[in-house]
Image: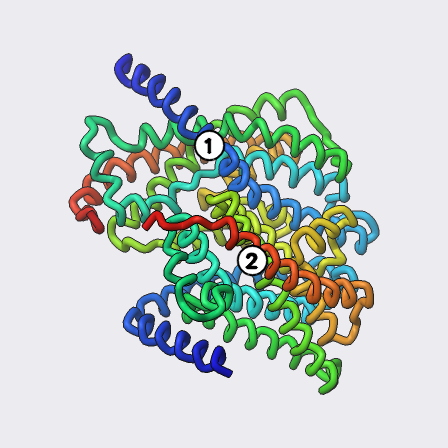
Amino acid sequence: MKNLSSIYAAAFKVMVLQQLQHRAELFIWLNSRIIDPLMYLVIWNVIAQAQKGSVDGFSPGDFAAYYLISMLVSSLTYTAIMWEYTYRITNGMLSALLLRPLHPIHTDFVETIVNKLLILLVLLPVTGILIVMFHPTFHIRFWGVLAFFPALLAAFVLRFLLEWMLAMAAFWFTRITAINLLYSALLTFFSGSFAPLTLLPNPLPQLSMLLPFRWIISFPVELITERLPRSAILFGFFAQAAWLLLLLGCLTLLWHHALQKYTAVGL
Amino acid sequence: MRYIKLFWCIVRINLLNEVAYTTNFVLQLIQSLIDLGTALAGLRIIFLYTDVLNGWHSSQLGALLGIYLIVRGGIHLIIQPAMQQLLSDIYTGKLDFTLLKPLDAQFLASTQRINIWASVDIVLGSSVLGGALILMRNQCSPLGVLKFGAILLVGGAIIYSFWLLLASSAFWLIRIESILALFQTMYQAGRWPSSIYPAWLRFLLTFLIPVALVTTVPAEALTGQIVETDFFALLILAVVLPILARFIWLQGLKTYTGTSV
């Protein structure tokens, strides 16, 4: 355990330096995480205005608060691993990673954490500007905020594990763009990124309870915007924990099989 | 005439190269269908809550989506592959080979690569547009269709010039792949009519990145609700941008030193 923490500390330093090298790129990739929620916010605002000020209990101010927090959560949990994995395999880059006596997921995890800390530098001012532009109304209560942070942390780890596991499809199929797009499409609807889950037609909201996507983005957002009854809060944390355990199990199991498929295409 | 013949030859070479990889076609088809499905599902959800989105009915937004797919298909078909090749040629110095040929370098650089599978998007987009037009019935005249085609071509010229302008900046900035990526995410915004965005965002989309114009104005032309300021902005851009792009391209060539191959 002590060994692993010193590895994490070393990797942290390396990743900070590595990412600062490409600092402009960090923020350019962040761009689509900002544009998408803005588009949806604008659309729902237009609808709310047409429907005499609110859609199903959401006023324009509520929508603004919802989408700004959703933007923060999706930016802070986002990983690019599904898009990088094919590259890693077809270039044989993975070979070098496999030579280390350490599962490559560890350095990826540290890299994602570093990335999140660095993008906060841009994300917070952007949020500030958008608050001025869109006038969100926050109904913040102490317990909601307190529950938000552990939920966000669990969402971060959950999304990282899920996307790392799905990226492993590249071992079998090499080109996984279609899988990635399907995943993004499901994530857009079932994580509440397109619209708050309560606005989706039946049976999508019920379905979202069973899928992992809601617990990745929507759950922390619903917590802080005070849209959940107490029983649903407990269920949410339970679902996050269950998915975390399930994914850890699947990852360990699949990794073994995946490595046997690896042929280092390209090198 | 010579250039048209040459262009046809380049298209044929690219076609012959690509038909060997039919899996690419299947993958592209699957990806485009997923994308289309997502967009249609989004529209469906929106129109559960309203009948009109800022003056646009669902069939009109469907037409806009079709145009968006056609324009995007056009970009992926010819503009983006050529420009990405140009960027790497500037970086590696391979642009030397293009410059040595006794033809206009801008023409060669802009047509050097064609990703024929992107035409899947154009076909899908046209079907969506066709479907939307049937739903709208009598709302478009032959003159409207003619206008639509002309405006779409003008839009294509604007987008091409804009990409060339961005790519030419690589003569000075060298690595700009991420700027192109930025443009692509902004382009997403063209899925929705430009009038729904608040004024400051609209200004950004329309003038800094001529995204909204290229999709919204043709849709407006087709549904007969053209906004005159949009139309004139489009015309001005269509004159100014190609000239500017050509000028920057020529200036860039002067600073190009290449020879690293």
* Above or below, B260 relative to A149: below
Give A74 or A129, whichever is nearer the viewer.
A129
Residue B41 as seen in the image, left or right of residue A59: left
Q: Residue B61: image x %, image y %?
A: 67, 66
Residue A79 as seen in the image, left or right of residue A204: left
SS under mark 1:
helix
Q: Residue B193: image x %, image y %?
A: 71, 61
Using a 10 Å C-alpha cutoff, classify the residue at mark 1 as few (fewer than 14 neighbours), some (14 to 19) or many (20 or more).
many
Give B191 or B19, whichever is nearer the viewer.
B19
Q: Amino acid at mark 2?
A: Leu
Q: Amino acid at mark 1?
A: Phe
* Above or below, B189 relative to A238: below
Query: Residue A163's quadrant in the figure?
Result: top left
- Can you identify the residue that label 1 sits on? A156
Could you tell me if residue B117 is visible in this image? Answer: yes
Question: Between tags 1 and 2, which lies in front?
Answer: 2
Query: Residue A254's quadrant in the figure?
Result: top left
Residue farthest toward the top in the current orientation of the protein: A2
Using a 10 Å C-alpha cutoff, classify the residue at mark 2 as few (fewer than 14 neighbours), some (14 to 19) or many (20 or more).
some
Give A219 or A122, whichever is nearer the viewer.
A122
Please tell me which residue is depicted at 76% across the width and 44% down the height of the picture: A60
Q: How many marks?
A: 2
| Residue at mark 1: chain | A
Please tell me which residue is depicted at 28% across the width and 53% down the height of the picture: A174
Please tell me which residue is depicted at 60% across the width and 51% down the height of the picture: B186
* Above or below, A243 relative to B62: above
Structure colour scheme:
rainbow
Query: Residue A176's quadrant in the figure?
Result: bottom left
- Can you identify the residue that label 2 sits on? B250
Q: Residue A222: image x %, image y %?
A: 61, 36
